[in-house]
Structures are given as C-alpha cells and as structure tokens.
Image (cartoon, rainbow, N blue to C red):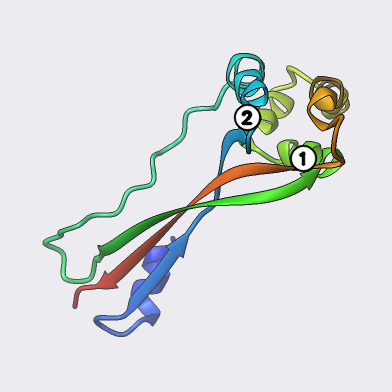
Amino acid sequence: KFFAEADRILKPKSFIVAYDNYFLGKMSDNPKFNDWYKNKFLKNFPTPLRAERSFAKKSENPKDFVLVKEEWHENFIELSKKQFVDYLLTITNIINRVENGEKSIDEVSEWLNNEIERFFIEKGRENFVFTAPIWYLKRRE
C-alpha cells in the first residue's frame, strides 16, 4: 500500500529513503546475556514467520522503485531494566504468544523481569546492540 501511494504522489526519478532498526539479541560486552537471549528467550518466544523485506535492484516496470544503495549501521541503545522489558513486550516474538492466548502479558512481564535481573546487577542501565539498515530507492520513470 505504501509503495502504491508513493507511486501516485511522487514525481518520476524521485527517491525514497527507508530505514529500520533491529535488535540483535545482544548486550554490549556481555556474552552471558547473548547466550541467554539465544538459548532461553528465543526458545520461549521464537520469532514468528514473516515476509522478508527485500527491494529489487532491477525491474522492468518503469514505475517501480529500485534499490540504488543499501547501508547497515550498528548502534547501541542504553536501557534500564524496565525500559528493556517494556521494549521486549512490544516485539512480535512476545505479541504473537500473547495474542494467541498462550501467555498473558503479565506472565511474560514477570518472567522477563525475573530472567534479566541478573544482567542489571552492577549498573542500572546496559547497552544493547541494534542494527539499522537504510535503503535508498529510486522511482524509475
């Protein structure tokens, strides 16, 4: 729907810059958290199937948007335990289980708070690793 509307309102040879920011399941400088995320969190809350985001580098359709350039940037976000739990409660891994009635949001929140307490003992805030793709797209016509 977005690209249909962009096609309608943008002039030929216009650009769209799209970006996202993904949590990599890592805490900066804490391999124990990284192991916990991979071996415990993802086992309890697996990533649901979803369509992969991809952009064509070439197209025969003159109105298509084609990928001109793609960049990936690693970034760090410092979060308190509460902020991190609140963030995790918004990701599809958890939303999927809650909406399917497998867990209540309160159960998940309590489990997360208990599980990650050990990673916040020394400091009140920790750095989490994200990656941010940026896609530069150009309308052909």
Identify the residue at the far bottom of this view.
Answer: 11
Q: CA distance from mark 1 to mark 2?
A: 14 Å
Q: Position of residue 23 (x, y in %)?
A: 58, 41
Task: Name the one closer to the observer, 71 or 58.
Answer: 71
Quadrant of residue 90 within the rendered picture = top right
Please state which amino acid type lies under the numbered disc 2.
Answer: Asn
* Quadrant in which the C terminus is drawn: bottom left
At 63% across and 38% down in the image, what residue appears?
A: 28
Residue at disc 1, secondary structure: helix
Query: Is 37 on the left-hand or right-hand side of 131?
Result: right
Q: Position of residue 95 (x, y in %)?
A: 69, 33
- Which residue is disc 1 drawn over? 84
Task: Name the one closer to the observer, 33 or 138.
Answer: 33
Quadrant of residue 1 within the rendered picture = bottom left
Neighbourhood count class around disc 2 (C-alpha, 10 Å): few under 14, some 14–19, many 20 upward: some
At 63% across and 34% down in the image, what residue appears?
A: 29
Please state which amino acid type lies under the numbered disc 1.
Answer: Phe
Quadrant of residue 39 within the rendered picture = top right
Examine the rendering and report whether any part of residue 104 can be seen.
Answer: no
Examine the rendering and report whether any part of residue 30 can be seen.
Answer: yes
